Amino acid sequence: MGAIKQKIQKTPLSKLVKAGGRLLHPSISGLLLRDRFDLRRAPGPSRRHLDAAIQWICRAHDQCGGQGVAQGFSLLHGWHPPYPETTGYIIPTFYDYALLTGREEFRERAAQMADWEIEVQMASGAVVGGAWRGPDHKATPVVFNTGQVILGWCRAYVETKDECYLAAAQRAGDWLISVQSPDGSWRLPGAETETLVHAYDARTAWSLLEIYKLTNDERYLLPARRNLDWTLAQQQENGWFQHNAFFTASQWNMPLTHTISYVMEGLLESWRLIGVEKYFQAARKTAEKLLRIFESESFMPGEFDSSWKTSASYSCLTGNAQIAGVWLRMAEITGERRFLDAAVKLNDYVKSTQLLNAIHPGIRGGVKGSHPISGRYTPYTYVNWGAKFLADSLMLEEQILESFAHTAPRGEKPELADLAGVVRISG
């Protein structure tokens, strides 16, 4: 509470007045009251929640002039500036949604985002850390952010065949290779983290493999393999990963479900691209541990220590959507029904926190960092990546459930194993 009090004391009066006005808005005051007593809504049809999340991202995109996507909407500070890192991995989400709905406008938005990412790419090829605050603001290159934008550029190239996107991805990939440590990790300071080295850079390795897939250039394969092998060395026997938190003990040093999911996603998508079985098995070990916790507690706490213990009473909604997405992929690959059942339940939890009819456009259809919104992860803020990962998970859920229904023999209830290998969604 002391840190919050100091922050308030340093905030200019004009900003405090605006924040007070936002908090008095009926949508926001109602949200705070419901969160205080955990008065969640019954989840509706997944397509309705998906459409609302995408529309929220569109509003965040429009807030930034149709270029990058606003980092989020804060109850205290309003809309944030555009965020290069997450704008990068929103690009594939919009292409997927365009494919699902047949609406060209979402392809156009994805291309606008990819073009903006080229405009703000650093001369070195790297991507800046933190929110974009203009060309005159001091820029710090960040490894993870660079990898996430590569994912967007690679997808834009696949969709458009415009060489400018592949060229930008390769420039970024070349920079990543140039700053990699000999052990395969990346150890550069970041703009928003205290920690120096991160297991969740498995998603960065995945981005190099996407370039490799498009170019067949082994310069991108070998550094990716080095990082993934280093990541596996960080995994404990119980599935928990060392070096996977944003902060040190001076704040809190436990990995969030968000960063835990990042590692699983990086390993799983890398397995998809190059078929190395140990990457799949490592992701599965962590996914199964989280599944057992959820089955036991019927709740997913926002963070865990190395023994999978936690005192967290909040849930990280972004991490929930990501975990559900990983479980859906596990269900798809293995045919095991328990992953599908748990994924649908966890998606329903996130949906129950999403306000579909709120008057205020900053919260309508968005996804909070934490539930309750005062939780430790991005408190009092709706984040663009929360909406992105919920959209991804709901699209995959819809595809799997539809394929499940279509494979059912007339009058019979099929096993989920009938679906193994049927459904594939882009990374």
Image: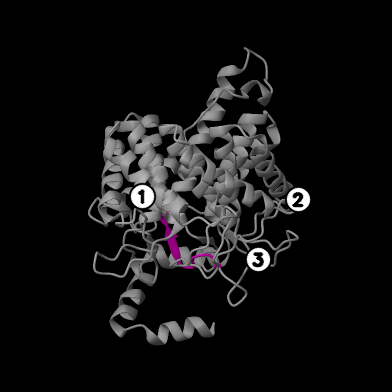
| Disc assigned to residue 125 | none
Q: Which residue bears the numbered disc 1?
A: 57
Residue 328, how many percent across, how many down? 59, 37
Question: Mark 3 vs mark 2: which is more N-terminal?
Answer: 2
Q: Secondary structure at mark 3?
A: loop
Please state which amino acid type lies under the numbered disc 1.
Answer: Ile
178 relative position to 15: left or right = right
134 relative position to 212: left or right = left
CA separation, marks 1 and 2?
34 Å
Can residue 162 be seen from the camera position used here?
A: yes
CA separation, marks 1 and 3?
28 Å
- Label 1 environment density (alpha carbons within 10 Å; few <14, some 14–19, many ≥20): many
Question: Mark 1 vs mark 3: which is more N-terminal?
Answer: 1
Residue 36, how many percent across, how many down? 55, 68
Q: Secondary structure at mark 1?
A: helix
Tell which of 289 and 300 is nearer to you. Answer: 289
Majority secondary structure of the magenta segment?
A: loop
- Label 3 environment density (alpha carbons within 10 Å; few <14, some 14–19, many ≥20): some
User: Are the residues at dot 1 and dot 3 in contact (C-beta closer than 8 Å)?
Assistant: no
Residue 361 in the image: above or below residue 420 = below
Q: Which residue bears the numbered disc 3?
A: 312
| Disc assigned to residue 296 | 2
Give, as a single range, the part of the protein colored magenta. 375-384
Magenta stretch contains residue 280: no
User: Are the residues at dot 1 and dot 2 in contact (C-beta closer than 8 Å)?
Assistant: no
